[in-house]
Image (tube, coloured by chain):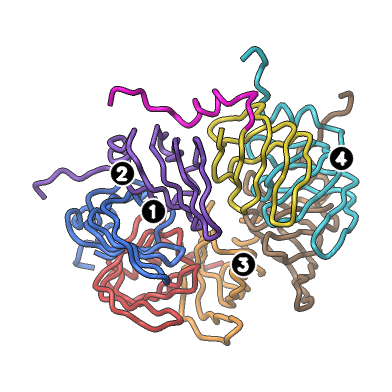
Chain colours: A cyan, B brown, C orange, D red, E blue, F purple, G yellow
Amino acid sequence: MGVMPEIPFDVLEQSINKRVIVSLVGRREYRGTLLGFDKPHMNLVLKDAEEITESGERKIVSAVIRGAAIEYVSP
Amino acid sequence: MGVMPEIPFDVLEQSINKRVIVSLVGRREYRGTLLGFDKPHMNLVLKDAEEITESGERKIVSAVIRGAAIEYVSP
Amino acid sequence: MGVMPEIPFDVLEQSINKRVIVSLVGRREYRGTLLGFDKPHMNLVLKDAEEITESGERKIVSAVIRGAAIEYVSP
Amino acid sequence: MGVMPEIPFDVLEQSINKRVIVSLVGRREYRGTLLGFDKPHMNLVLKDAEEITESGERKIVSAVIRGAAIEYVSP
Amino acid sequence: MGVMPEIPFDVLEQSINKRVIVSLVGRREYRGTLLGFDKPHMNLVLKDAEEITESGERKIVSAVIRGAAIEYVSP
Amino acid sequence: MGVMPEIPFDVLEQSINKRVIVSLVGRREYRGTLLGFDKPHMNLVLKDAEEITESGERKIVSAVIRGAAIEYVSP
Amino acid sequence: MGVMPEIPFDVLEQSINKRVIVSLVGRREYRGTLLGFDKPHMNLVLKDAEEITESGERKIVSAVIRGAAIEYVSP
């Protein structure tokens, strides 16, 4: 293997204070700065976020997103 | 990193007695004053709330919202 | 903060023997007197209830509602 | 409060050998005699039951219904 | 009460080697001989089964059905 | 009873290196050689598989299928 | 049996730093290099990925995919 595998929560750890895309099971998407998360639920805190749905966008100053609703987080 | 990460439940803690938006998996939305919550379920207590659905709004004096139904909480 | 936060199950405790609205994930709604509940599942016992769906109402003398089906309980 | 709250599983206990309505998340409904249940899953045993769906009724001599599929049980 | 309540898993125990109907959450139905099950998941083993869907029937020599997909089992 | 009941995971054990049909909750179906599984999640490893959906078939050299998505496994 | 069964997480272990297809419950698909995963949730880290939906493709530099949203992983 030679390369250390990257654990999902380590990748989130390295993404703190960086912009991420959060894609939800129900097809909504959020783009914002990742302020923190918890284990093992993967609840996230986003800041300066935009919510993107089929019907448009809206600004969200900050949000606690429940891990159970998340499909993927893209750093 | 330099900045302490913000844990989701700490953000909720700081939002107590403030207005929040609660967005549910089934696309309903509630706006109200956050009175409290529990861990790890993220059940919430809202006061002076409005329920917003595709078919309109209605007033809700108070509500216990089950965490499992929540997509995000926006302080 | 100054004001004690209200825990979801305490709010349910204070609602015992009072009228509540129970809104389910599948958009059905029940109105009735809350006789009791359990933790952590939030299964509820309602008495003298009405079931309200898109196709009308019906009377329900009493019902045990599973917590997993509940979106919110409004005292 | 003055009146003892009624715990959901106690209400089921008192309904044993009596007729109940079991309403499922997927809108099917069963009417039958409750023979027993288990905790905490709320799996039920019904006897002499009828299954009622949008497409009609059918007789079911007995059935083990999984708690996870249940929305409410009405004694 | 006078009559002993029947526990769901006891009823399944008594149905081993007998024909049962297994109705799934997604409206598919299986009829076959119950060879065994496990607790608490209620995974089942069926033999000489038929799968019945809206689009017809097909024979299944044997199947392990996941409990999480089951709505009811009718002995 | 006379005949030993067959436990679901034993049936899977006996199906290792044999062809199985895996039917998923979302109506997709896989046919392939079962290489292994884990307990209690029922995650499966399939080899030389075909994915069959409403829109056709495709070959899959191997796949780890999550147990939570499985409706039944037919040996 | 003669051949050692292959455990799902071992197959993922052997796929680290290789291209995989990740098929989600909601019919989205990702193709990318598997950087790591965790147990028992099966959260994955993908790099140099493409998201493929009915409405087209898009590039994703990296993503943490939640195990609960995954249907299968094909090495």
Residue where numbered disc 1 is placed: D39
Q: Is G18 colored magenta in this rendering?
A: yes
Tell me which chain the residue with mark 4 is part of: A
What range of the chain is rendered magenta? G1-19
- State which mark lies toward you, 2 or 3: 2
SS at circle 4: strand
Query: B21 or C49: which is nearer to us?
Result: B21
* Cβ–Cβ under 8 Å for marks 2 and 3: no
Residue where numbered disc 4 is placed: A33
- State which mark lies toward you, 2 or 4: 2
Q: Amino acid at mark 1?
A: Lys
Q: Which mark is residue C15?
A: 3
Place residue F39 in its image quadrant: top left
Q: Which mark is residue F8?
A: 2
Give the residue drawn at x 88%, y 53%.
Answer: A60
The furthest residue to the left: F2
On screen, residue C15 versus residue D33, left or right, reads: right
On screen, residue A69 versus residue G73, left or right, reads: right
Report, in whole angstroms, how far the alpha carbon at label 2 lies from the one at label 4.
Answer: 46 Å
Give the residue drawn at x 50%, y 85%.
Answer: C59
* Cβ–Cβ under 8 Å for marks 2 and 4: no
The x and y percentages for residue C9 are 61, 56
Question: Dividing the image into 4 quarters, which one contains the N terminus of chain B?
Answer: top right
On screen, residue A63 versus residue E21, left or right, reads: right
Query: C71 or C9: which is nearer to us?
Result: C71
Q: Amino acid at mark 4?
A: Thr
Q: Amino acid at mark 2?
A: Pro
- State which mark lies toward you, 4 or 1: 4
Report, in whole angstroms, how far the alpha carbon at label 4 lies from the one at label 3.
Answer: 40 Å
* Cβ–Cβ under 8 Å for marks 2 and 1: no
